[in-house]
């Protein structure tokens, strides 16, 4: 079984308008209301690719109920922890002459809620896959990803981590099955600006030396790089297509890699599936479907 954890899910309210004018009433040209959060995106894309999974995390208030309903409408299994104080976030994303985002705070998550999450993690078995993805709210200790990995060390679970800076670096000593920074995040970890794939490979190898089993680095329109368990380096250009929406493309790459690995046991095929899935989401209004991914795979 595959599990995803999203610590701070959201409703993404996406609006488009020709120009955002401050201090007056603005009218939208179009609107979308979508469930948001990196782990949630991974869950939806995995289900679109035909892989059942369970979405874990924390929800609160009427917004939390809506997020849960939207996920279930996509066919996802959910087992969220209900938080009494506050409400799940609404993130407003305004697409106009300048893109603007207003992100909510989220509910107050206490120690008891964290204990409930650990009780759910107790159900994981050897061979399961756990995806820890995204940022964490201020009410949670930033060691939480590391703490979870330490807690599950003896269970032979493949853990995938898609996070930034300390959240990612702190888990490396526990040998995560895969980490997926993008090229900018990889550069931030080492305090450098990466200019090309050769530099991405160099610093990706350093992450592997620090403990990651597989390192997958997304590079938006420039493709991706994978340094696999055996130290082999895989490179790919991004498939050709029109960028429609980059939100969720990196999460889709994670889902595609997992699906490809489960279906083939091959890192090369998993990598190509990841790249195709990330690109399919970038070329779509929402998240990739199986048909869209398979169409792109024909050109790779």
Image (spheres, grey):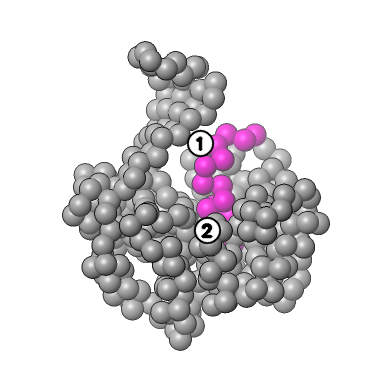
- Residue depicted at 64% across the width and 54% down the height: 188
Residue at the far left: name it: 84
**Image height of 167 relative to 35, above or below:** below
| Residue 81 on image: x %, y % | 26, 61
Indicate the secondary structure of the residue bearing disc 2: loop
Any part of residue 85 in sight: yes
* Image quadrant in which the N terminus is located: bottom left
Q: Position of residue 31 (x, y in %)?
A: 40, 28
Q: Quadrant of residue 234?
A: bottom right
Q: Secondary structure at mark 1?
A: loop
Residue situated furthest top in the rendering: 24
- Magenta segment includes 184: no
Residue 245: quadrant of the picture? top right
Percent of width and height locating residue 97: 54, 21
- Magenta region: 242-257
* C-alpha distance separating marks 1 and 2: 24 Å
Task: Please check the rendered image and state whether residue 251 is part of the magenta-colored stretch, yes or no.
Answer: yes
Residue 193 to residue 163: above or below: above
Foreground residue among 243 and 84: 84
Which residue is drawn at the image coordinates 65% and 61% (left, top)? 216
Q: On the image, numbered disc 2 is attached to which residue?
A: 163
Residue occupying image coordinates x 59% and y 49%: 278
Instruction: In the rendered view, tell whether residue 100 sits above or below residue 72.
Output: above
**Is residue 9 rendered to the left or right of residue 276?**
left
At x 51%, y 36%, the residue is 285
Q: Position of residue 212 (x, y in %)?
A: 62, 72
Is 148 displayed left or right of 285 in the figure? left
Return the residue found at the far right. 198
Q: Which mark is residue 285?
A: 1
């Amino acid at each position: 079984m595959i599990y995803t954890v999203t610590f701070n899910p959201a409703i993404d309210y996406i609006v488009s308008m020709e120009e955002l004018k401050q201090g007056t009433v603005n009218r939208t040209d179009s609107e979308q209301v979508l469930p948001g959060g990196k782990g949630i995106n991974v869950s939806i894309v995995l289900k679109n690719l035909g892989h059942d999974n369970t979405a874990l995390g924390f929800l609160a208030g009427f917004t939390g109920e809506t997020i849960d309903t939207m996920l279930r409408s996509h066919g996802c299994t959910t087992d969220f922890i209900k938080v009494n104080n506050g409400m799940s976030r609404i993130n407003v994303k305004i697409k106009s002459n300048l893109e603007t985002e207003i992100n909510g705070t989220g509910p107050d998550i206490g120690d008891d809620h964290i204990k409930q999450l650990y009780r759910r993690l107790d159900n994981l078995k050897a061979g399961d896959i756990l995806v820890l993805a995204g940022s964490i709210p201020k009410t949670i200790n930033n060691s939480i990803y590391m703490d979870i990995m330490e807690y599950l060390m003896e269970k032979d679970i493949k853990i995938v981590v898609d996070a930034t800076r300390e959240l990612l670096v702190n888990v490396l000593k526990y040998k995560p099955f895969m980490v997926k920074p993008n090229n900018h995040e990889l550069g931030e970890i080492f305090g450098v600006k990466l200019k090309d794939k050769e530099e991405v490979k160099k610093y990706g190898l350093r992450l592997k030396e620090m403990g990651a089993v597989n390192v997958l680095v997304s590079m938006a329109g420039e493709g991706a790089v994978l340094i696999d368990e055996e130290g082999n380096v895989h490179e790919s250009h991004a498939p050709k297509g029109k960028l429609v929406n980059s939100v969720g493309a990196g999460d889709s790459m994670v889902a595609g890699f997992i699906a490809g690995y489960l279906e083939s046991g091959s890192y090369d095929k998993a990598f190509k599936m990841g790249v195709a899935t990330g690109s399919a989401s970038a070329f779509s209004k929402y998240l990739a479907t199986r048909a869209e991914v398979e169409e792109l795979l024909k050109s790779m």
